[in-house]
Amino acid sequence: MNEKPKLNLFISYCHADEDKKEMFEKFLVTLRKNGEITDWNDRKIDVGSKFDSEIKRNLEESDLICLLISQDFLNSDYCMNEELFRALKQVDDGKSRIIPIILDHCMWLDTEISNYMATPKDGKPICDFIPETKAWMEVMSQIKTVIKKLELKPLKKKEVLITPEDSEVITADKLLLLKDSFIEEINSTEITLQSPHKENVTLQDIFIYPDFKFLDDDISEHEVTRNSEFYSELSRFPTHSLVVGEEQCGKTSFAKMVFKTAISDGAIPVLLKGRDINKSDINHYLERALNLQYDNLNIDQFKHNNKEKVLIIDDLSDIKLNHAYLDKFVSRIMDTFDKVLFLSDESIRFDEHKANIFNNFEQFELLQLGYERRDELIKRWHSLGREEEIEDEYLINLVKTTATHLDMIVRKNIVPRKPIFILMILQVLDSGKPSDYSLTSHGYCYQRLIEENLNKVKIKPEEIEKYINYLSQLAFYMYEKETYSLNESQMQHFHKFYKSKFNLGTNDQVIEKLLDSKILKLSNENYSIRYKYIYYFYAAKYMSNHSECLNFVEQLCRKTHIEKDSNILIFITHHTKNDDVISLITEKTTQIYKDTNEALLDRSDTEFLRKFMSNIPKLVMKQKHNVDEARKESLRKQDQSENKSERFDIESLDDDPEFDCIRDITRSVRAIEILGQIIKNRHASIELGQLETLSAEATKVGLRFLSFYLKSTEQVQTEVMDMIHSHLEDNLNLTVEEISKEVSKTFMQLVYQITFNVVRKVSFSVGHKELVDLFSDIALKADTPAFYLIEASMLLEFSSSRNNIPKRKLENIWKKVNSNFLAKRLMQDVILQYQYFNYVSYQDKAWIASKLEIPLETQEIVQSNKKPKALSRKH
């Protein structure tokens, strides 16, 4: 039997950290004895050998390069200019992997090292661990994971774009092929894109890796922001991760790119949709997905294949499982796959039970595009089809001009900073129709895009109405059939039905034209509206113009926890001019948590937190004496859960009180969006008194949910006991004080994150540049920290100019909230979030540092234009 080759591990360090390097070597001994590695550092240079040439030779032969990072390392010219420079070239050439090991607090986030996933987890310095050996064990665990992957797949360069010609995955036993239909799906964009310089625009052409906000577990530190490009390389994927983002923020595109990366790196990825999952047996969905995605891979071959297995689940919030079965489903997934990525909309951020299920996952928030990412997207767009010919100077000027136009549009709150809307506007700008800058809602963006697609297939302007009517009837027909697609027979039935009601003229090519315009899609003999938001848009148009509109609205209001129904309702607010429709939507959506008073975020709301956390040491002591009994009880519960029948109908969840809770959480999030859309669409036509009432009610929906959450949090002793029990099992050597600190930190972060999410959700949904003064009056009447924080967020977003923020008003709000730790910290994060997305002058930053207690250094890092790096933590 041939012995497997050892991997060469190179240690790059500064001699001032000799003691840390020696500790690292002690932990490497086991890997060395097991024949997994050969490690080298400059202390192994023989007397008389050339120092520089020996280092260079060993670097070039290395598979793994471990960087021991401290401020001394960063200050060393040789470490940074010689060893790091060569290490980065090794990575670029596909010959080595870099593993940064953070020894101490230092400025590594301001260097190129920040582009690589660091260890210990989240870049927490080794010096912060007690004892430090715990940190070194975590480092070794991650190094062993990388070694395992390198043994399975040698390092090589890759192409991420998948085409029918290069979509093959080489495995140990056979050649695996993706199905052509799935290749088309994985390469498709969320909207039809028409570039003047490239005929067919794929996702690969325009995708940029967005920034992530790392959801930290300590609110005493500002959350770390990093570029998500670490997902462009399989070995850098977190083992289990959850990515949360607003609707249309690019989650589906990101999921597709992760799939491309995984398959290009030799793994076997599987992509699932949350809406298809209503049972906890993963094998049920795995078999179907393999059949749809791969040409020659069944479930038995999959399970016996030794390649790394990656699962990506898009739209987690659409999974039709209650909490107990979702927990079971996640556990089974983790037993089946090497790496797992879930993507979810915002509703999960407000659900503490789900947060607990994913507590051990790396969690990120997918951000809208800041200045740097937006410029990358503009540059990518203008380079399409002419990458090799466009001159740099011309491209830079083109990007600057386009960015100026986008600034105007974003500032006017015409579109959010999401890739899909930025791309829509780029197409409009290319069409040379500046009147479209005056768009006032998302609905108009879709309408303009659809009309552009019809124009490009030579539809005459006088015929566009015919196609819009056809799409409206078709979308509603699909809605009634509760389907997203029609087979050939169903499509012909609909077409015949349509012709019996409406005149199509002598040249009946409507289906062919809609297919050519890429509004309709034909795949596997099934017709569908290519993009679901076009489906929602036209179903809403049909309902808005129908005599039964009020009945439709009432039905939709009962199902706002379902994405399809809530989005159709949002588009109805765009289409309709009927005040009765608006009144009915308002009445129904404001009933959620109607028996709960809205949260104030004053001391009365958070006093229980102080009392509860002061009792945690007692709980730890109690649990410490009952570890065995607690473990037996936990095992008994697992046995009971396993004995439950897995055969349940999803409809039965409607009678499940736990599902009621999930549904109400989602409904409250949707209600804020729907009411906000009414405010944005109708702010100029609703009387001031009604507009003020509507704005206040929309805000109260969010604050009533927050109050419900805060009150329910008082009853979570069982969950806290579980957290303590988990810490005791995993950290037997920790003291009562250490465990208490960890549990308190995690518990407080749950409360803080949901509170911040509510403040942000309300301010962005309800806010509008024409309504800032109105909301200031509302906040003054309410006179609570919660309303003032939402006002501060609105002031920044809708009343700030490029060179000036409303300092006087912000200072007045600061004086009202800064005596409350939670409210004070929330306002600081509102400021930092604004700075990520917007330019802030040095004078304003100096004022923020002086008046709002956010150091200039922290602000500079947030708004830095340097190539992707992360927000620094306070040390």
Image: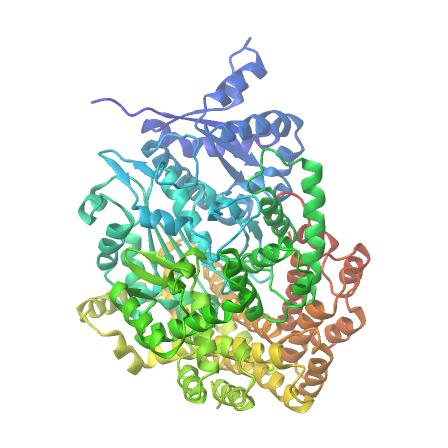
Residue 365 vertical position relative to residue 767 in the rendered view, above or below: above
x and y, in percent, of residue 477 in the image: 35, 75
Residue 638 visible in this rendered orientation of the protein = yes
Front residue of 351 and 733:
351
Front residue of 520 and 282:
520
| Residue 854 placement: quadrant | bottom right
Residue 410 vertical position relative to residue 201 in the rendered view, above or below: below
Q: Is residue 260 left or right of residue 871?
A: left
| On-image quarter of the N terminus | top left
Q: Is residue 719 left or right of residue 481?
A: right
Residue 614 vertical position relative to residue 840 in the rendered view, above or below: below
Residue 724 visible in this rendered orientation of the protein = no
Tell me which residue sits at (39%, 69%) in the image. 721
Extreme residue toward the front, this view: 506
Front residue of 72 and 588:
588
x and y, in percent, of residue 520 in the image: 40, 61
Tell me which residue sits at (32%, 73%) in the image. 482
| Residue 113 placement: quadrant | top right
Front residue of 73 and 480:
480
x and y, in percent, of residue 483 in the image: 32, 70
Tell me which residue sits at (43%, 51%) in the image. 188
